[in-house]
Amino acid sequence: MAREGQIEIRQGGLRVQPAESLRGPIRLGHSPTDAPTHPTTPDGRYFVVRGRLWRKTNPHLPDDVREALVTQLMDARRALRRPLSDAERGAAREQVDQAKRALGERGPVWWTDGAPDYNRKLAKNTPYRDWFIGLTS
């Protein structure tokens, strides 16, 4: 069943108006404003995708720093889609890891209360279990 919202038509990665003539394959999807958000744990440390906790970016990073790190991360991820030598692939993976660590999504946790890290764990196997079950019921 389709979700309510505005349908977007894309061809060659560009948005196309319904009245325009179309050639070749098209892609139908919801506009980015309709994109679903993933639930965030009550303490704001993780979001949940398919039952698994993923650590969120450090909310204390200044916006300009966060934006620069996200740009670095996305550039490295795009590079990994291209044909690369083993050395180039390793360098791109290292760049992804460095950006994710600087964002606080990997490595030492960004909170200071001593709580353990549950990154990449199933929510049902963590102290967030009751909160998570409450979402699905």
Image (cartoon, rainbow, N blue to C red):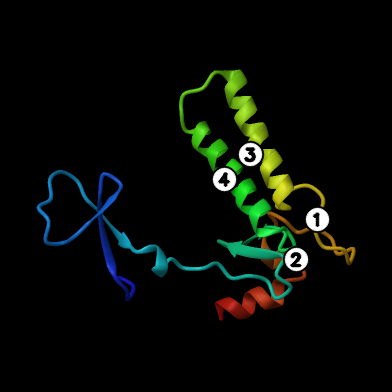
Which mark is on residue 109?
A: 1
Establish if 29 lies above or below 94: below
- Residue at which label 2 appears: 126
Q: Quadrant of residue 30?
A: bottom left
Could you tell me residue 80's position as x and y percent?
Answer: 52, 32
**Furthest-right residue in this view:** 114
Residue at point 57% right, 45% down? 71
| Residue 32 image position (x, y, % from top left) | 40, 63
Q: Is residue 111 above or below residue 74?
A: below
Q: Quadrant of the C terminus?
A: bottom right
Q: Earlier in the sequence, mark 2 or mark 4?
A: 4
Q: CA distance from mark 1 to mark 2?
A: 16 Å
Category of crowding for the residue at label 3, using alpha-carbon neighbours closer than 10 angstroms: few (below 14), some (14–19), many (at least 20): many
What is the number of the mark on residue 71? Answer: 4
Q: Name which residue type carries label 1.
A: Val
Identify the element where label 4 is drawn.
helix
Question: Nearer the N terminus, badge 4 or badge 1?
Answer: 4
In percent of the image, x 64 and y 27: which residue is there?
91
Q: Nearer the viewer, mark 3 or mark 4?
A: 4
Residue 102 in sight in this render: yes
Alpha carbons under labels 2 and 3: distance apart: 27 Å
Report the amino acid beneath label 4.
Thr
Q: Are marks 2 and 4 in contact (CB under 8 Å)?
A: no
- On the image, numbered disc 3 is attached to which residue? 96
